[in-house]
Amino acid sequence: MPIWNRKIERMERSELEQLQLERLQAVVNRVYRDVPFYRRKFEQLNIAPEDVQSLEDLAKLPFTTKEDLRDGYPYEMFAVPLREIVRIHSSSGAAARPIVVGYTRNDLRHWAEQVARILSAAGVTKDDVVHIAFDYGLFTGGFGMHYGAERLGASVIPVSVGNTERQIQIMQDFRSTALVSTPSYALYMCKVMDEMGVSPASLYLRVGLFGGEPMSESMRSRIEDRLGILATDNYGVSAVMGPGIAGECELKEGLHINEDHFLVEVVDPKTLTPLPEGEQGELVITTLTKEGVPMIRYRTRDITSIDRRPCRCGRTTARMSPVRGRTDDMFIIRGVNVAPSEIEALLYQIENIEPKYQVVLERENGLDYLTLNVELAPHMVTDQMQRLVELEETIKQRFHRVIGLTPRVKLVEPKSLENVDRSNRVIDLREKQQ
C-alpha cells in the first residue's frame, strides 16, 4: 500500500504535535501582523500572539466564519501583497459576494503535495491515467486535483465537466485508470454508458476519487458495483485550500488529514467548546502553512468526528469520519453549495412571485436535480400560460446566473406554501432514490 510522504504521514504523534505548535505560533504571528481583521479580533479578546504556548491555547483564538470572508471581499483577508499572489480562486457558493482565496507559489507547491498524498492513499501511482471531470475554473476542485496528480507523476486528462458521451469515449480511447468527479456524476456516467451500450468491462478504470458533495455508503457501493472500481471519499474546503485536506486510503476507514498543514478541532455547534476525540461535532480548521489567505479556526459547518489512532495502512495522521451533514441549512448539489437564504434573496428581485418557496432535491439515473417550487403573487392568474412560461424562464435564468445551476421551476398557487418553514424548506429525496 503506497504512502507518498512516509516521513510526514508516519510521523510519531509527539513529533507531529511539536511541528504543529511551531507552525501555529508562526501563523498566529503572521496574521496578527499582516491581516487587520485578525488583529482586531485578537485585540477584542485581549489576546496576543505570545499567548499561544501550546496546542491547547488554540481554544483561546477567535473563530473565522464564511460571513467574515464575504465581508472581506475581495482581498481584505489576504496576508500578502497582491503581487505575491499567483492564483486566485473563488467559492462555488451562491452568494452575491463569494469567498475569494489567493495562493502564493509556496501555497501551490504545498497544495500539489497535499493532493498527491490523497491520490497515493487511494492507490494512484505515476503509472495511472487520471481522468478529471471536475470544473476547471474558479472552483478549486479541477485545478487542485490536476496539479496533485502531476506532482504524483501520473498522466492527467483535464476533461472538465459536461459532454458525457465524449468523456466516456475518452475514457475508453485514452485508457483512463482513475476517475475524479462528484459521486453523482459518476452514477450519471453509468446511465449514459448503458444508453451508449458501453460495458464498464471495456474501460480501464480501477479507482475513483470522489468529492464536491457527500457520498453515502449506499452511493459508494453503487459506484463500485457499476464501474467495478474502488471508490474513495475526499474532503476539501475552498476557503481553506480546496481538495487535499483529507482523503481515504484504500482501507476506507476514515479520511486521513494532512495534519502538518491543517490543525483540526471538533467543537459543539452550540457552545463552540472543543469536544473529546471521537465525538461528532462541527469541524474547525486552522491552516498552518497557507501564506496567501491563512485561516484561524475556520468554521466549516460540516459534521464529523476525529480519530487519532494509527490506521492499519501504516499512516499515523488523524482521520475524520465522512461528512454526512451540516450545522446550517446549506445543501450541496452537483458540487455547488447553496444556502436557502440566498435563494430567498434571489427571488425577492423577481416580480410577480412571492419570496415563498420550497426546494426538492431528487436523484434520477444517478444525476441530481433541483426543483424549485415558487409561490405566485396574488394578482397573477394561473391560466395566463404565456406569462407563466416567461416567469419560469426568468427564474431559471436568474438562478443559473447567480448560482450556476438551472433548476426545474414549478409555479404554485398563492398561499399554497404558507406551511413551509425551515424544517421543510429543503426536501432531500436523494438517499431514497439511489
Image (cartoon, rainbow, N blue to C red):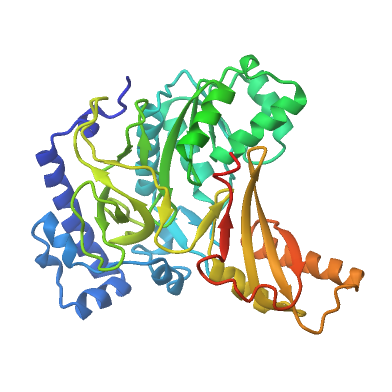
Q: Is residue 374 above or below residue 300?
A: below
Total labels: the figure holds 0
Q: Is 81 in front, or is 192?
A: 192
Q: In this view, does 39 lie to the left or right of 413?
A: left
Q: In which quarter of the image is the N terminus?
A: top left
- Point out residue 128 in the picture as x, y percentages from the top left corner: 49, 21
Left or right: 415, with 339 as reference point = right
Pick the front one: 312 or 325: 325
Give residue 93's position: percent from left, percent from top: 53, 60
User: Residue at horizontal 52%, vertical 26%?
Assistant: 224
Judge left or right: residue 67 versus residue 64. Answer: right
The image quadrant that residue 415 belongs to is: bottom right
In the image, residue 39 sits, relative to residue 122, either above or below, namely: below
Q: In which quarter of the image is the C terminus?
A: top right
Residue found farthest to the bottom: 379
Q: Residue at x 37, y 25 (%)?
A: 250
Please name whichever residue, 10 or 423, is drawn nearer the observer in this view of the structure.
Answer: 423
Relative to 109, residue 85 above or below:
below
Residue under the image location 51 percent in, 20 percent down: 206
Q: Give the x, y percent position of residue 49.
A: 15, 67
Residue 95 visible within the image: no
In the picture provided, is 11 more to the left or to the right than 182? left
Figure check: 382 above or below 135: below
At which x and y percent is residue 143? 51, 43
